[in-house]
Amino acid sequence: MDRRCIVFFVKNWVVSVAIVVVCIFFWGVNDASPLRCDDLVYQFMWLKGGNGAYPVDINNRIDSFYEAIISQINHYQVMNGRFTVHFIVQCFCGFWGKSMFNIINAIVYALFLLGSILLLKLDTLLENLFLIFMLWLLLPIQYIFTFDISFAVNYLWVATACIYFIILFEKALLLSTSHTWWKLALLFIYSLMCGSSQEGFTIPLSASVLIYTIINFKKLNTNSFYLILGLWVGTALVVFAPGTLKRGNSVVADFDMLAFIHTKIQVLMYSKRFLFFILLLFLTYINKGKQYVVNFMCEHFLMIGLIVFNLLFVLAFPRYNQRLEFPLELMSVLLAVHLIIMSKLWKRLRLILCPFIIVVALVHMAFTVHYARLVGNEYKEMIEEYRLSSQGETHYRDFHIPKPFSSYVIRFGGSVEEAFVSFTMNKKVVVIKKDREEATRSTR
Protein backbone atom coordinates (compact mmCIF):
# COMPACT_ATOMS: atom_id res chain seq x y z
CA MET A 1 0.00 0.00 0.00
CA ASP A 2 1.18 3.52 -0.80
CA ARG A 3 2.79 5.25 2.20
CA ARG A 4 0.52 8.30 1.84
CA CYS A 5 -2.55 6.05 2.09
CA ILE A 6 -1.21 4.45 5.28
CA VAL A 7 -0.57 7.87 6.82
CA PHE A 8 -4.06 9.03 5.80
CA PHE A 9 -5.83 6.06 7.41
CA VAL A 10 -3.71 6.14 10.58
CA LYS A 11 -4.29 9.89 10.99
CA ASN A 12 -8.05 9.55 10.55
CA TRP A 13 -8.31 6.59 12.93
CA VAL A 14 -6.34 8.39 15.64
CA VAL A 15 -8.37 11.57 15.20
CA SER A 16 -11.61 9.55 15.33
CA VAL A 17 -10.53 7.82 18.55
CA ALA A 18 -9.57 11.19 20.07
CA ILE A 19 -12.98 12.66 19.23
CA VAL A 20 -14.75 9.62 20.70
CA VAL A 21 -12.72 9.84 23.93
CA VAL A 22 -13.47 13.56 24.34
CA CYS A 23 -17.16 12.98 23.63
CA ILE A 24 -17.37 10.21 26.25
CA PHE A 25 -16.15 12.68 28.88
CA PHE A 26 -18.48 15.30 27.43
CA TRP A 27 -21.39 12.88 27.76
CA GLY A 28 -20.33 12.14 31.35
CA VAL A 29 -20.65 15.79 32.34
CA ASN A 30 -24.04 16.09 30.66
CA ASP A 31 -25.25 12.84 32.20
CA ALA A 32 -24.46 14.18 35.68
CA SER A 33 -26.60 17.26 35.08
CA PRO A 34 -30.37 17.25 35.73
CA LEU A 35 -32.93 19.58 34.18
CA ARG A 36 -32.51 23.11 35.50
CA CYS A 37 -33.10 26.82 34.71
CA ASP A 38 -34.79 27.39 31.35
CA ASP A 39 -35.10 23.63 30.74
CA LEU A 40 -37.70 23.47 33.50
CA VAL A 41 -39.75 26.17 31.79
CA TYR A 42 -39.53 24.56 28.35
CA GLN A 43 -41.24 21.43 29.65
CA PHE A 44 -44.53 23.30 29.49
CA MET A 45 -46.83 24.97 26.98
CA TRP A 46 -46.07 28.62 26.27
CA LEU A 47 -49.09 30.93 26.40
CA LYS A 48 -49.65 33.59 23.78
CA GLY A 49 -51.43 35.93 26.21
CA GLY A 50 -49.59 34.98 29.39
CA ASN A 51 -48.00 37.33 31.88
CA GLY A 52 -44.62 37.34 33.61
CA ALA A 53 -41.09 36.62 32.47
CA TYR A 54 -42.00 33.04 31.50
CA PRO A 55 -45.66 32.87 30.44
CA VAL A 56 -46.17 29.08 30.52
CA ASP A 57 -48.95 26.78 31.69
CA ILE A 58 -47.31 24.53 34.32
CA ASN A 59 -50.37 22.24 34.20
CA ASN A 60 -49.83 21.49 30.51
CA ARG A 61 -46.63 19.53 29.88
CA ILE A 62 -45.42 19.11 26.28
CA ASP A 63 -46.13 15.49 25.23
CA SER A 64 -46.04 15.53 21.42
CA PHE A 65 -44.65 17.23 18.31
CA TYR A 66 -48.00 18.92 17.76
CA GLU A 67 -47.98 20.48 21.24
CA ALA A 68 -44.34 21.58 20.77
CA ILE A 69 -45.28 23.31 17.50
CA ILE A 70 -48.29 25.09 19.06
CA SER A 71 -46.15 26.12 22.03
CA GLN A 72 -43.45 27.53 19.75
CA ILE A 73 -45.98 29.44 17.66
CA ASN A 74 -46.98 31.17 20.90
CA HIS A 75 -43.33 31.53 21.94
CA TYR A 76 -42.59 33.19 18.57
CA GLN A 77 -45.21 35.80 19.40
CA VAL A 78 -44.21 36.62 22.99
CA MET A 79 -40.54 35.66 23.57
CA ASN A 80 -38.23 35.52 20.52
CA GLY A 81 -37.96 34.21 16.98
CA ARG A 82 -35.82 31.12 17.65
CA PHE A 83 -38.55 28.75 16.51
CA THR A 84 -36.19 26.07 15.17
CA VAL A 85 -33.91 25.68 18.18
CA HIS A 86 -36.62 26.07 20.81
CA PHE A 87 -38.80 23.50 19.07
CA ILE A 88 -35.91 21.04 19.53
CA VAL A 89 -35.49 22.19 23.15
CA GLN A 90 -39.16 21.62 23.94
CA CYS A 91 -39.10 18.15 22.39
CA PHE A 92 -36.20 17.11 24.62
CA CYS A 93 -37.51 18.83 27.76
CA GLY A 94 -41.06 17.64 27.20
CA PHE A 95 -41.04 14.02 26.01
CA TRP A 96 -37.70 12.85 24.55
CA GLY A 97 -35.97 13.29 27.91
CA LYS A 98 -32.57 14.27 29.24
CA SER A 99 -30.99 10.82 28.70
CA MET A 100 -31.57 10.95 24.94
CA PHE A 101 -30.37 14.54 24.86
CA ASN A 102 -27.09 13.59 26.56
CA ILE A 103 -26.32 11.13 23.77
CA ILE A 104 -27.39 13.42 20.91
CA ASN A 105 -25.52 16.36 22.42
CA ALA A 106 -22.30 14.30 22.54
CA ILE A 107 -22.78 13.44 18.86
CA VAL A 108 -23.29 17.13 18.04
CA TYR A 109 -20.10 17.94 19.95
CA ALA A 110 -18.27 15.35 17.82
CA LEU A 111 -19.63 17.08 14.69
CA PHE A 112 -18.50 20.40 16.14
CA LEU A 113 -14.92 19.11 16.59
CA LEU A 114 -14.88 17.58 13.11
CA GLY A 115 -16.32 20.75 11.58
CA SER A 116 -13.65 22.85 13.31
CA ILE A 117 -10.93 20.65 11.78
CA LEU A 118 -12.48 20.94 8.31
CA LEU A 119 -13.03 24.68 8.65
CA LEU A 120 -9.37 25.37 9.49
CA LYS A 121 -8.19 22.86 6.85
CA LEU A 122 -5.67 21.25 9.19
CA ASP A 123 -3.41 18.62 7.62
CA THR A 124 -1.24 16.73 10.10
CA LEU A 125 -2.22 14.41 12.92
CA LEU A 126 -0.64 16.59 15.63
CA GLU A 127 -2.46 19.69 14.37
CA ASN A 128 -5.83 17.91 14.54
CA LEU A 129 -5.19 16.51 18.02
CA PHE A 130 -3.95 19.87 19.28
CA LEU A 131 -7.14 21.58 18.11
CA ILE A 132 -9.45 18.91 19.57
CA PHE A 133 -7.99 19.09 23.07
CA MET A 134 -7.38 22.84 23.06
CA LEU A 135 -11.07 23.39 22.34
CA TRP A 136 -11.91 21.50 25.53
CA LEU A 137 -9.49 23.60 27.58
CA LEU A 138 -10.54 26.94 26.07
CA LEU A 139 -14.29 26.23 25.94
CA PRO A 140 -17.04 26.15 27.19
CA ILE A 141 -17.82 29.80 27.71
CA GLN A 142 -20.24 30.40 30.58
CA TYR A 143 -21.36 26.77 30.74
CA ILE A 144 -22.68 26.78 27.18
CA PHE A 145 -21.44 23.32 26.25
CA THR A 146 -22.68 21.52 29.34
CA PHE A 147 -25.72 21.12 31.60
CA ASP A 148 -28.67 22.94 30.06
CA ILE A 149 -30.54 21.64 27.04
CA SER A 150 -31.59 25.18 26.11
CA PHE A 151 -28.02 26.53 26.35
CA ALA A 152 -26.50 23.66 24.38
CA VAL A 153 -29.03 23.81 21.53
CA ASN A 154 -28.92 27.62 21.35
CA TYR A 155 -25.13 27.82 21.30
CA LEU A 156 -23.29 24.54 20.67
CA TRP A 157 -25.76 23.25 18.09
CA VAL A 158 -26.11 26.62 16.37
CA ALA A 159 -22.32 27.10 16.33
CA THR A 160 -21.94 23.67 14.73
CA ALA A 161 -24.60 24.46 12.11
CA CYS A 162 -22.95 27.80 11.25
CA ILE A 163 -19.50 26.19 10.98
CA TYR A 164 -20.87 23.72 8.41
CA PHE A 165 -22.66 26.58 6.62
CA ILE A 166 -19.28 28.31 6.14
CA ILE A 167 -17.75 25.02 4.91
CA LEU A 168 -20.63 24.49 2.45
CA PHE A 169 -20.45 28.10 1.27
CA GLU A 170 -16.71 27.88 0.57
CA LYS A 171 -17.15 24.59 -1.29
CA ALA A 172 -20.11 25.97 -3.28
CA LEU A 173 -17.95 28.82 -4.59
CA LEU A 174 -15.47 26.32 -6.03
CA LEU A 175 -18.05 24.36 -8.07
CA SER A 176 -18.23 25.17 -11.75
CA THR A 177 -21.61 23.48 -12.28
CA SER A 178 -24.92 23.86 -10.50
CA HIS A 179 -26.44 21.19 -8.29
CA THR A 180 -29.68 19.47 -9.26
CA TRP A 181 -32.90 21.12 -8.09
CA TRP A 182 -33.35 18.88 -5.05
CA LYS A 183 -29.80 19.52 -3.85
CA LEU A 184 -30.36 23.25 -4.24
CA ALA A 185 -33.58 22.88 -2.23
CA LEU A 186 -31.66 21.08 0.54
CA LEU A 187 -29.03 23.83 0.58
CA PHE A 188 -31.76 26.45 0.87
CA ILE A 189 -33.56 24.59 3.69
CA TYR A 190 -30.32 24.03 5.61
CA SER A 191 -29.26 27.67 5.33
CA LEU A 192 -32.82 28.78 6.21
CA MET A 193 -32.65 26.74 9.43
CA CYS A 194 -29.21 28.19 10.20
CA GLY A 195 -30.46 31.72 9.63
CA SER A 196 -33.56 31.26 11.78
CA SER A 197 -31.69 29.60 14.65
CA GLN A 198 -30.15 32.26 16.89
CA GLU A 199 -29.71 35.95 16.12
CA GLY A 200 -26.42 36.24 18.02
CA PHE A 201 -24.81 34.03 15.37
CA THR A 202 -26.89 34.65 12.29
CA ILE A 203 -26.89 38.47 12.27
CA PRO A 204 -23.05 38.67 12.23
CA LEU A 205 -22.84 35.75 9.77
CA SER A 206 -25.42 37.34 7.45
CA ALA A 207 -23.54 40.65 7.59
CA SER A 208 -20.27 38.89 6.79
CA VAL A 209 -21.85 37.12 3.81
CA LEU A 210 -23.28 40.45 2.64
CA ILE A 211 -19.84 42.10 2.66
CA TYR A 212 -18.34 39.07 0.90
CA THR A 213 -21.12 39.21 -1.72
CA ILE A 214 -20.45 42.89 -2.42
CA ILE A 215 -16.69 42.40 -2.74
CA ASN A 216 -16.77 39.09 -4.64
CA PHE A 217 -20.04 39.31 -6.56
CA LYS A 218 -18.53 37.81 -9.72
CA LYS A 219 -17.42 34.68 -7.84
CA LEU A 220 -20.96 33.77 -6.81
CA ASN A 221 -22.82 30.96 -8.54
CA THR A 222 -26.23 29.30 -8.31
CA ASN A 223 -25.17 27.03 -5.44
CA SER A 224 -23.90 29.89 -3.28
CA PHE A 225 -26.94 32.00 -4.19
CA TYR A 226 -29.36 29.50 -2.60
CA LEU A 227 -27.21 29.32 0.53
CA ILE A 228 -27.14 33.12 0.81
CA LEU A 229 -30.87 33.46 0.16
CA GLY A 230 -31.78 30.87 2.78
CA LEU A 231 -29.49 32.46 5.38
CA TRP A 232 -30.89 35.95 4.86
CA VAL A 233 -34.54 34.83 4.87
CA GLY A 234 -33.95 32.82 8.05
CA THR A 235 -32.21 35.75 9.73
CA ALA A 236 -35.14 38.02 8.84
CA LEU A 237 -37.57 35.51 10.36
CA VAL A 238 -35.76 35.45 13.70
CA VAL A 239 -34.95 39.18 13.88
CA PHE A 240 -38.41 40.48 12.93
CA ALA A 241 -40.40 37.97 14.97
CA PRO A 242 -43.06 39.67 17.13
CA GLY A 243 -41.48 38.25 20.27
CA THR A 244 -38.03 39.56 19.34
CA LEU A 245 -39.38 43.03 18.59
CA LYS A 246 -41.37 43.03 21.83
CA ARG A 247 -38.30 42.20 23.92
CA GLY A 248 -36.21 44.67 21.92
CA ASN A 249 -38.66 47.47 22.68
CA SER A 250 -38.50 46.65 26.39
CA VAL A 251 -34.69 46.85 26.30
CA VAL A 252 -34.82 50.25 24.60
CA ALA A 253 -37.44 51.50 27.08
CA ASP A 254 -35.20 50.57 30.03
CA PHE A 255 -32.09 52.18 28.51
CA ASP A 256 -29.69 53.75 31.02
CA MET A 257 -26.55 55.57 29.82
CA LEU A 258 -24.40 54.74 32.86
CA ALA A 259 -25.36 51.08 32.66
CA PHE A 260 -24.65 51.14 28.90
CA ILE A 261 -21.13 52.49 29.47
CA HIS A 262 -20.55 49.92 32.22
CA THR A 263 -21.52 47.09 29.88
CA LYS A 264 -18.94 48.22 27.30
CA ILE A 265 -16.25 48.00 29.98
CA GLN A 266 -17.48 44.49 30.78
CA VAL A 267 -17.12 43.51 27.12
CA LEU A 268 -13.42 44.41 27.24
CA MET A 269 -12.96 42.66 30.59
CA TYR A 270 -14.54 39.35 29.61
CA SER A 271 -13.49 39.02 25.95
CA LYS A 272 -10.27 37.29 26.98
CA ARG A 273 -10.13 34.86 24.08
CA PHE A 274 -10.70 37.67 21.58
CA LEU A 275 -7.91 39.73 23.15
CA PHE A 276 -5.64 36.67 23.05
CA PHE A 277 -6.37 36.27 19.32
CA ILE A 278 -5.61 39.95 18.69
CA LEU A 279 -2.30 39.57 20.54
CA LEU A 280 -1.35 36.54 18.44
CA LEU A 281 -2.35 38.37 15.26
CA PHE A 282 -0.15 41.32 16.26
CA LEU A 283 2.82 39.01 16.97
CA THR A 284 2.27 37.32 13.62
CA TYR A 285 2.29 40.72 11.95
CA ILE A 286 5.66 41.52 13.59
CA ASN A 287 7.22 38.17 12.69
CA LYS A 288 5.79 37.49 9.24
CA GLY A 289 4.72 40.88 7.92
CA LYS A 290 1.60 42.67 6.75
CA GLN A 291 0.96 40.58 3.64
CA TYR A 292 0.95 37.33 5.59
CA VAL A 293 -1.68 38.69 8.00
CA VAL A 294 -3.77 40.04 5.11
CA ASN A 295 -3.69 36.64 3.39
CA PHE A 296 -4.66 34.92 6.63
CA MET A 297 -7.65 37.23 7.11
CA CYS A 298 -8.76 36.81 3.50
CA GLU A 299 -8.52 33.02 3.82
CA HIS A 300 -10.84 33.16 6.85
CA PHE A 301 -12.97 36.07 5.66
CA LEU A 302 -16.31 34.89 7.05
CA MET A 303 -14.81 33.96 10.42
CA ILE A 304 -13.14 37.37 10.72
CA GLY A 305 -16.45 38.95 9.68
CA LEU A 306 -18.26 37.01 12.39
CA ILE A 307 -15.82 38.38 14.96
CA VAL A 308 -16.11 41.98 13.77
CA PHE A 309 -19.90 42.08 13.45
CA ASN A 310 -20.51 40.16 16.66
CA LEU A 311 -18.27 42.66 18.47
CA LEU A 312 -20.25 45.54 16.97
CA PHE A 313 -23.50 43.79 17.94
CA VAL A 314 -22.36 43.34 21.55
CA LEU A 315 -21.10 46.93 21.79
CA ALA A 316 -24.36 48.30 20.40
CA PHE A 317 -26.59 46.16 22.64
CA PRO A 318 -27.75 48.16 25.69
CA ARG A 319 -27.44 45.25 28.12
CA TYR A 320 -24.50 42.96 28.74
CA ASN A 321 -24.70 39.18 28.76
CA GLN A 322 -21.55 37.11 28.37
CA ARG A 323 -23.41 34.63 26.17
CA LEU A 324 -23.78 37.36 23.52
CA GLU A 325 -20.01 37.16 23.01
CA PHE A 326 -19.98 33.45 22.25
CA PRO A 327 -19.57 33.78 18.44
CA LEU A 328 -16.80 36.34 19.00
CA GLU A 329 -14.99 34.13 21.51
CA LEU A 330 -15.47 30.87 19.58
CA MET A 331 -14.11 32.21 16.30
CA SER A 332 -11.26 33.88 18.19
CA VAL A 333 -10.31 30.52 19.74
CA LEU A 334 -10.36 28.71 16.39
CA LEU A 335 -8.26 31.37 14.66
CA ALA A 336 -5.88 31.67 17.63
CA VAL A 337 -5.21 27.92 17.53
CA HIS A 338 -4.61 28.18 13.79
CA LEU A 339 -2.10 30.99 14.32
CA ILE A 340 -0.28 28.91 16.94
CA ILE A 341 -0.07 25.97 14.53
CA MET A 342 1.32 28.24 11.80
CA SER A 343 4.01 29.71 14.07
CA LYS A 344 7.69 28.81 14.26
CA LEU A 345 7.25 27.92 17.93
CA TRP A 346 4.83 25.14 16.96
CA LYS A 347 7.29 23.70 14.45
CA ARG A 348 9.99 23.55 17.10
CA LEU A 349 7.95 22.30 20.06
CA ARG A 350 5.01 20.41 18.55
CA LEU A 351 6.31 17.00 19.67
CA ILE A 352 6.35 18.27 23.26
CA LEU A 353 3.45 20.75 23.26
CA CYS A 354 0.80 18.49 21.69
CA PRO A 355 1.25 15.50 24.07
CA PHE A 356 1.37 17.90 27.02
CA ILE A 357 -1.95 19.51 26.03
CA ILE A 358 -3.53 16.07 25.53
CA VAL A 359 -2.51 14.88 29.00
CA VAL A 360 -3.64 18.11 30.69
CA ALA A 361 -6.98 17.98 28.87
CA LEU A 362 -7.63 14.32 29.76
CA VAL A 363 -6.88 14.94 33.44
CA HIS A 364 -9.11 18.03 33.37
CA MET A 365 -11.93 16.02 31.78
CA ALA A 366 -11.77 13.34 34.47
CA PHE A 367 -11.96 15.87 37.31
CA THR A 368 -14.71 17.80 35.52
CA VAL A 369 -16.91 14.69 35.41
CA HIS A 370 -16.18 14.10 39.10
CA TYR A 371 -17.23 17.62 40.14
CA ALA A 372 -20.24 17.52 37.82
CA ARG A 373 -21.49 14.44 39.64
CA LEU A 374 -20.96 16.11 43.02
CA VAL A 375 -23.03 19.09 41.91
CA GLY A 376 -25.71 16.90 40.35
CA ASN A 377 -26.08 14.90 43.55
CA GLU A 378 -26.21 18.13 45.59
CA TYR A 379 -29.06 19.36 43.42
CA LYS A 380 -31.07 16.15 43.88
CA GLU A 381 -30.46 16.08 47.63
CA MET A 382 -31.59 19.70 47.98
CA ILE A 383 -34.83 18.95 46.17
CA GLU A 384 -35.46 15.84 48.29
CA GLU A 385 -34.74 17.78 51.50
CA TYR A 386 -37.18 20.46 50.40
CA ARG A 387 -39.89 17.89 49.72
CA LEU A 388 -39.51 16.40 53.20
CA SER A 389 -39.35 19.76 54.98
CA SER A 390 -42.58 21.03 56.50
CA GLN A 391 -41.27 24.61 56.25
CA GLY A 392 -39.98 24.41 52.68
CA GLU A 393 -36.35 24.56 53.74
CA THR A 394 -33.18 23.18 52.16
CA HIS A 395 -29.39 23.63 52.38
CA TYR A 396 -26.35 23.91 50.14
CA ARG A 397 -23.76 21.18 50.64
CA ASP A 398 -20.35 22.06 51.99
CA PHE A 399 -17.80 21.48 49.23
CA HIS A 400 -15.64 23.68 47.02
CA ILE A 401 -15.08 23.49 43.26
CA PRO A 402 -11.51 24.54 42.29
CA LYS A 403 -11.30 27.44 39.84
CA PRO A 404 -9.96 25.40 36.87
CA PHE A 405 -13.29 23.53 36.85
CA SER A 406 -15.72 26.25 37.93
CA SER A 407 -16.37 27.34 34.33
CA TYR A 408 -17.39 23.78 33.44
CA VAL A 409 -19.33 22.85 36.58
CA ILE A 410 -21.89 25.33 37.90
CA ARG A 411 -23.53 25.29 41.32
CA PHE A 412 -27.25 25.55 40.87
CA GLY A 413 -28.05 28.49 43.13
CA GLY A 414 -31.26 30.26 42.24
CA SER A 415 -32.37 27.59 39.78
CA VAL A 416 -33.20 25.35 42.74
CA GLU A 417 -36.21 27.56 43.45
CA GLU A 418 -37.41 27.06 39.87
CA ALA A 419 -37.05 23.33 40.33
CA PHE A 420 -39.16 23.42 43.51
CA VAL A 421 -41.96 25.20 41.67
CA SER A 422 -41.68 22.77 38.76
CA PHE A 423 -41.64 19.60 40.85
CA THR A 424 -44.21 20.57 43.48
CA MET A 425 -46.52 22.66 41.27
CA ASN A 426 -46.89 25.35 43.92
CA LYS A 427 -45.24 28.65 44.79
CA LYS A 428 -44.81 28.42 48.55
CA VAL A 429 -41.96 30.27 50.25
CA VAL A 430 -38.60 28.53 49.93
CA VAL A 431 -35.79 29.15 52.41
CA ILE A 432 -32.30 28.24 51.17
CA LYS A 433 -29.47 28.04 53.68
CA LYS A 434 -25.73 28.00 53.03
CA ASP A 435 -25.18 25.53 55.87
CA ARG A 436 -27.06 24.13 58.82
CA GLU A 437 -26.75 27.29 60.90
CA GLU A 438 -26.67 30.34 58.66
CA ALA A 439 -29.60 31.35 56.42
CA THR A 440 -28.53 33.33 53.38
CA ARG A 441 -31.73 34.23 51.66
CA SER A 442 -35.46 33.71 51.33
CA THR A 443 -37.21 33.64 47.98
CA ARG A 444 -40.77 33.52 46.73
Image (tube, helix red, strand yellow):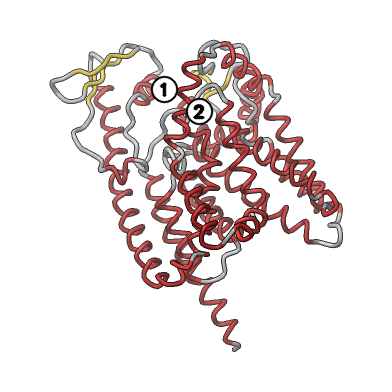
Residue that extends furthest to the bottom in the rendered view of this protein? 1
Q: Quadrant of the C terminus?
A: top left
Q: Position of residue 229 (x, y in %)?
A: 79, 41
Q: Position of residue 432 (x, y in %)?
A: 25, 20
At 27% from the left and 22% from the top, the residue drawn is: 386
Residue that extends furthest to the left in the rendered view of this protein? 437
Give me the disc on residue 41: none
Which element type, helix, strand or loop, lies under badge 1? helix
Q: Position of residue 280 (x, y in %)?
A: 48, 53
Q: CA distance from mark 1 to mark 2?
A: 9 Å
Q: Position of residue 98 (x, y in %)?
A: 46, 40
* Amino acid bearing label 2: Gln
At 49% from the left and 64% from the top, the residue drawn is: 343
Q: Is residue 215 left or right of residue 152?
A: right
- Work out whether residue 427 or residue 157 is closer to the camera in this orientation and state it: 157
Nearer-N-terminus badge (1/2): 2
- Label 1–label 2 contact, CB within 8 A: yes
Which element type, helix, strand or loop, lies under badge 2? loop
Q: Number of marks in the image?
A: 2
Give me the disc on residue 43: 2
At 38% from the left and 47% from the top, the residue drawn is: 29
Mark 1 surroundings within 10 Å by alpha-carbon count, few (fewer than 14), some (14 through 19), many (20 or more) = some
Quadrant hosting residue 167: bottom right
Mark 2 surroundings within 10 Å by alpha-carbon count, few (fewer than 14), some (14 through 19), many (20 or more) = many
- Work out whether residue 317 or residue 379 is closer to the camera in this orientation and state it: 317
| 426 lies above or below 176 | above
| 157 lies above or below 253 | below
* Amino acid bearing label 1: Ser
Q: Quadrant of the N terminus?
A: bottom right
At 22% from the left and 21% from the top, the residue drawn is: 433
Q: Is residue 186 left or right of residue 131?
A: right
Q: Which residue is mark 1?
A: 422
